[in-house]
Image (cartoon, rainbow, N blue to C red):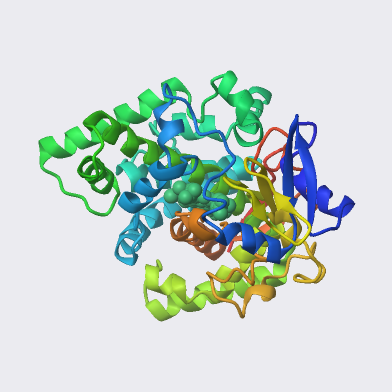
């Protein structure tokens, strides 16, 4: 924790520019894979590497132990079968309408606080608010908005998750990298009070809907509620089914909060220093709105915005929110002629290194959206581009996450010009496992 995990993985490749390198996590040897070919082998072999290395929680921590991100073995396969597909195109179209409302709240806050009142922008804090509001609205149907200064119940949870202090950093670092210590110290992904709070919020929304007879299929309340019956039909007891459902909501909030916040922060930061690219993006959005004849864009129209996707992808390449993917070998595995990965060994895929490898991305420290103009949104470029991971443990929220980013960026760029206010050099926070700028990063918003 003297340096961020992002810097650690990045510098590891600079110091040891090989396809793979051994490390020690305390007494535990591990392997870091740094070439697309070896990354592919580990990612696609779901028989040898079905699980993450991450600590998978204790019985007293239902959200930490039953969520899809950390869950292992058969239980995880069951969850995946019952849970997916959550983000169908029909559902994403409905979610677009909800997030568009959050996007408007975001641009209103920017106008109010940072243009009219001339306050200093802390991009990370601002983006946590937007991400929290989108989660409250799309997962729970809660319209109370922290961006509007209202008392959003979800904000109590998201602000805790994304807080970087030493103790939280130590807890999350141990969960990811020293699971044996996390087990001894009974560490938790979600604190006890946060778990109770989440449960209370969910059930109170369900109760109100049952009492009022309101049916709202735009958000995910009904989808998650129905999961309980599906888990029960798969042989789980009622109480376990309820905990399983709640754990997936917890994972949703955890997985979406950090990553999307960081991605948005870095996108806006890069755009401030790349005025030419910002204008190309503005023109693309302006043209799409003109064609649509409306003042907002819909799901299908977002699919046409190639430059916007390229801006996001290039940011996810250069400043990838999760610098590594983790797996653990459940049997001995012959990785190369010379290397056998022994059963129980953690394997980390060094995504920061792949994304900064000159062979695949020339001048990797340059931010150039053009790199991604010819590839599709879902192309992993032969395993050299892995911001959402890949294979059987790939990110389940990718489509939701991309949508959340596109809606916020398109609304901001259409209303404001973004200008730099600080040196073009963001230091990453050593207390955060995911990438996070140490002081939140800042830009200036100028109305168009
Ligand atoms: C920009 C936004 C996001 C980024 C960059 C991101 C990135 C990632 C990465 C790198 C992984 C690990 C993949 C692997 O090991 O191969 C992951 C897993 C996961 N993500 Fe995301 N994510 C994002 C948004 C979301 C959202 C919005 C959700 C909400 C549903 C989500 C849910 C998950 C879940 C449940 C997993 C675990 C999948 C499994 O282990 O089976 N993510 N994400």
Quadrant in which residue 209 is drawn: top left
| Whether residue 209 is situated above or below residue 402 in the rendered picture | above
Q: Nearer the viewer, residue 316 or 287?
A: 316
Tell me the quadrant of the picture where the C terminus can be found.
bottom right
Q: Is residue 208 left or right of residue 23?
A: left
Residue 217, position as x, y percentages in the image: 23, 53
| Whether residue 113 is situated above or below residue 194 in the rendered picture | below
| Whether residue 244 is situated above or below residue 390 in the rendered picture | above
Q: Is residue 103 left or right of residue 231?
A: right
Q: Nearer the viewer, residue 234 or 16?
A: 234
Q: Is residue 190 visible?
A: yes
Tell me the quadrant of the picture where the N terminus can be found.
top right
* Residue at image coords 57%, 71%: 379
Q: Nearer the viewer, residue 130 or 6?
A: 6
Residue 430, position as x, y percentages in the image: 74, 35
* Residue at image coords 58%, 39%: 125
Quadrant in which residue 397 is drawn: bottom left
Residue 5, position as x, y percentages in the image: 73, 41
Q: Is residue 231 left or right of residue 25?
A: left
């Amino acid at each position: 924790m003297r340096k961020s995990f992002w810097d650690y993985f990045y510098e590891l490749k600079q110091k040891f520019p090989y396809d793979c390198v051994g490390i020690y996590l305390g007494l535990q040897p591990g392997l870091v894979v740094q070439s697309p070919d070896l990354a592919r082998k580990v990612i696609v072999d779901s028989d040898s590497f079905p699980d993450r290395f991450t600590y998978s929680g204790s019985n007293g921590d239902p959200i930490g132990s039953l969520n899809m991100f950390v869950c292992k073995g058969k239980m995880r396969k069951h969850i995946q079968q019952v849970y997916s597909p959550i983000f169908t195109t029909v559902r994403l179209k409905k979610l677009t309408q909800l997030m568009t409302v959050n996007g408007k709240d975001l641009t209103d806050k920017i106008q109010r606080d940072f243009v009219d009142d001339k306050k200093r922008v802390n991009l990370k804090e601002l983006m946590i608010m937007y991400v929290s509001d989108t989660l409250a609205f799309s997962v729970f149907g809660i319209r109370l908005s922290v961006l509007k200064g209202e008392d959003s119940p979800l904000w109590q949870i998201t602000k805790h998750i994304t807080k970087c202090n030493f103790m939280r950093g130590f807890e999350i670092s141990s969960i990811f990298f020293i699971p044996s210590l996390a087990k001894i110290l009974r560490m938790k992904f979600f604190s006890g009070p946060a778990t109770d709070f989440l449960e209370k919020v969910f059930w109170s929304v369900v109760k109100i809907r049952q009492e009022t007879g309101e049916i709202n299929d735009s958000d995910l309340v009904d989808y998650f509620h129905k999961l309980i019956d599906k888990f029960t039909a798969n042989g789980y007891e009622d109480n376990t089914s309820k905990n399983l459902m709640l754990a997936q909501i917890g994972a949703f909030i955890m997985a979406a909060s950090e990553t999307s916040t960081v991605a948005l922060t870095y996108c806006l930061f890069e755009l401030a220093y790349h005025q030419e690219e910002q204008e190309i993006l503005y023109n693309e959005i302006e043209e799409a709105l003109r064609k649509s004849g409306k003042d907002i864009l819909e799901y299908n129209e977002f699919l046409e915005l190639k430059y916007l996707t390229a801006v996001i992808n290039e940011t996810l390449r250069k400043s990838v929110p999760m610098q590594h993917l983790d797996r653990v070998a459940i049997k001995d595995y012959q990785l190369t002629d010379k290397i056998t990965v022994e059963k129980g060994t953690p394997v980390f895929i060094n995504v920061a290194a792949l994304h900064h490898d000159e062979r695949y991305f020339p001048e990797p420290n340059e931010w150039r959206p053009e790199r991604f103009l010819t590839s599709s949104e879902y192309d992993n470029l032969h395993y050299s581009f892995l911001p959402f991971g890949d294979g059987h443990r790939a990110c389940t929220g990718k489509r939701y996450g991309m949508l959340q980013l596109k809606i916020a960026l398109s609304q901001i760029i259409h209303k404001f010009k973004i200008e730099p206010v600080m040196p073009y050099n963001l230091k990453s926070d050593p207390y955060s496992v995911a990438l996070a700028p140490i002081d939140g990063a800042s830009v200036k918003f100028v109305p168009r």
